[in-house]
Every structure is written in structure tokens, then in C-alpha cells.
Amino acid sequence: MNESLQKLTEFLQSSLTAYHAMQNAERILRDNGFTALSEAEDWEISEGGKYFVTRGASLVAFTVGGLDNFHYKIVASHLDSPMLKLKENPIVKSAGCLSLNVETYGGGIWYSFFDRPLTIAGQVIKNENGKLVKELVQSPFFVTVPSQAVHINRTVNESFAVNPQVDLLPLLSLDFENAEEKFLSSISGEGRVISYDLFAVSAQSPYTFGVNDEFIASPRIDNLTSVCASIEGLITHAESDGVCVATLFNHEEIGSRTPQGACGDFLENTLRRIAYALRFDDNEYYKALLSSFLLSVDNAHATHPNHPEKSDVTNKTKLGAGVAIKSHANGAYATDALSSAVVKTVFEKAGVKYQSFFNRSDARSGSTLAMASLARFGVNGADIGLPQLAMHSACECFAKNDYTEMCNGITAFYSSDLLFEEGGIVIR
């Protein structure tokens, strides 16, 4: 396994929640010379600098290139994945056992969460010397959601709809006294937990498979592969004009309608503050937007080898065939003919393999970050994605060489100069 894929599997393994993923991204950026900024303070930035700013569990990182052609090259991805979120007063007692009261976060394939190791992870809030502080935690033990035996649920192989309130409660322990207090202290250590955002998440380790070892399976492939590829591209891209931006959003899986989601003002405010710190006025900022470009990088559905009929008739996105450029007539994706041509040209210049993704015309489409972000500021944009199988399962999979193509494609995008001229776009 090459170094890039090794870093990815380590990121997948340790980024149990969006909070952990953001912390890991922040560490990688610091290790590569990026300076932390705060939304609450003035910014001092300069040409050649590398910076990042956080809000909640979202992060925007950027590098400042040459400013004669001031514009933004933005890559957006998201840090969260479907999982089970613990409610307050989480202990459920039944049949001499303790289970955890949870609700679903996002649209998971919930039957895939049964009968596998889950860990409890997230953030807790404590009061330390009169100050409310956040602490990232992970349980030192596993829990699991046990299935009913086929002898009891006789129709399980013909029809079984998961009831989240009944079927998805992770088994924690045999009954014992002071269960909730001891449960929280076993995860967070000393100090009273006032509140928390805790999740039961898949503890499956990433693994490779296939006769040629060509696939990787892991939890959270959607969308941490895009996060890693965008960070790698931002760190390794060649010098170019303008400001290169990597946006890592939280809350995509629940609609992005939060202050740290793509529908919020985090990215827009960051772009404005970059322009202000670089001494560009509003007029120059709006002109920069018109010559900017956004890539929304969120994974794509590969054609399932057992169900090829579920994919489009003439656009069957294949594992191992390169990055998917995603299009949709009714605006689920931002891609149009011009933005698709930009991506194809950038990729062809860099020798990056790509393919087309369309949904079947009789199937409902998902949506991504681009349309949520672009509703706030007007830039050209396109949707691309890593082809994968089992999206939103507790364990997903993809082809190794597609990830390499994605990394190379994002690096090429950041390294390109896009010149928006009257009558067309020049890419060099």
C-alpha cells in the first residue's frame, strides 16, 4: 500500500466522529506549516501563507498564491457519516440488561450496524474552574446491537424493517447500580459531564481485499476519502495564482442547515475575510467570485456488480475507472456543460482518469454540498466523487486506484490557473 493510502486508512481508523476527523485534519495541517486563525480575532495573512480556521466541527484551510489574478479555487467535502447518537438519560433497562437509548443520525443502512463492534465516541462538555470546556472521548470498550435469531424472527430473510427505537439499541452491560454515572465516567474520566454529543460508531478497522488486493473496505469512506484527498491536494499542489481553499463541513448527512454546515455562512464569511485581510475591497471580492470555481467532492455510487440494472443505462460508473463527474438535470449537482468541461480539461492535462455519473431517470437523486454553498455566493462549480459501493453502510468499499486518481485530480485543480475571459475560460 502506498503512502497516500496508508495515511488514508489511518485517518479512517481514528476519525470516529466529525469531531475526531476535524482534530486529525487540524493536526495534519499544523504539521505541514499551516497557521491557526480565529473567527473572534483579526487576521494577518500574506501571499505565500498557509492558514486554517475552525467553527464547531468544521474547518476551512487555505493557501495564498499569487494575487495578480485574485480568485478562489475551492474544494468542499464533509466530515460526518451516518451513525447512532445517544440521547440524554441513555440507559434502558430490560431483561436484566442495560442498553443505550439512541436516535439515528443521517440516513444509514441500519441493518448493517447489527452484530458488529461499535465504540462510543464524540465530545463531552465539562465545567473546569467555572469554564465550560469540550473534550473528545472514546470508550475503552465495545458495545453491539444484537439481531434477533432467525428462530424468533422467522421472516427476517423475507421482510424486515428496522425500527430505530426498538431494534437499534446497543447492548451495554448486565444491569448494575449507578449505571449512567459509571457509564459516563468510564468514557470521560474525572469530572462531571454536563452534556455530550456521543455516538455509537462502527469500530471496524479498514482492510484490503480482492485477489489483487485492489479494494479497501472501511467505515466512513463517505466522505473521509474526499477529506483526505482535499487536504493532500492543498498541501502538495504546485504554486498557482489565487487562493486555494479546502472546506471540511460538518452536518452534511443531516441536511447542512446549521452554522457549521454548507448552508451556513462559515465558508462565505471566510472568503470575505480573506479578501479583507489581503486589502481587497468589496468590488474586487465580487469580481474574484466571478472568476472562482468550487469542486464539491462527495462520493458517487459505483455500478453494483450484483445489480447493474440500478445504474443509468449509458453512464455506468465503474470501480477502478477513475473520478466520477456527477450531473443532474434538476439541480441535485452543480455540474453543467461548462463546469464539466473545466474539470475534464484540468484532469486531461494532468492525466487523471474520469468518468460520468448520472442517476437513472426513474430514481431519486441525493444532493451534495455544492448547491447548498453556491446558494450563498455565486461561483462556477461542479460535483465530483470517488466511486464506491455500500454507501452509508457501517462498512463501505472502493477501488484503491480511484483514490489515487482523486488525489491527483484535486492536486491538479489547485495547481491550475483558471482565467475567466470574455468568451470563454483559459486553463493553464
Image (cartoon, rainbow, N blue to C red):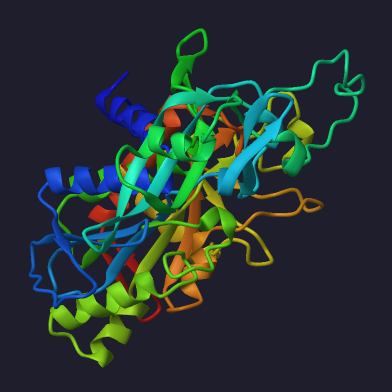
Residue with the most extreme top position = 211
Look at the picture and state if 252 lies above or below 140.
Answer: below
Foreground residue, 291 or 131? 131
Image quadrant occupied by the C terminus: bottom left
Give the image location of residue 169, x and y in percent: 66, 35
Look at the picture and state if 24 lies above or below 139.
Answer: below
Look at the picture and state if 256 lies above or below 225.
Answer: below
On the picture, is 17 further left or further right than 388? left
- Residue 400 occupies which quadrant of the picture? top left
- Residue 84 occupies which quadrant of the picture? top right
Look at the picture and state if 367 lies above or below 170.
Answer: below
On the picture, is 336 further left or further right than 38? right
Give the image location of residue 173, x and y in percent: 57, 24
- Residue at 46 percent of width and 64 percent of height: 261
On the picture, is 51 further left or further right than 110? left
Foreground residue, 5 or 317? 5
Whether residue 335 is visible to the viewer of this picture, yes or no, is: yes
- Residue at 44 percent of width and 51 percent of height: 196
Give the image location of residue 137, x and y in percent: 36, 40
- Residue 296 occupies which quadrant of the picture? bottom left
Give the image location of residue 328, x and y in percent: 65, 59
Whether residue 229 is visible to the viewer of this picture, yes or no, is: no
- Residue at 14 percent of width and 78 percent of height: 42
Foreground residue, 174 or 322? 174
- Residue at 54 percent of width and 62 percent of height: 335
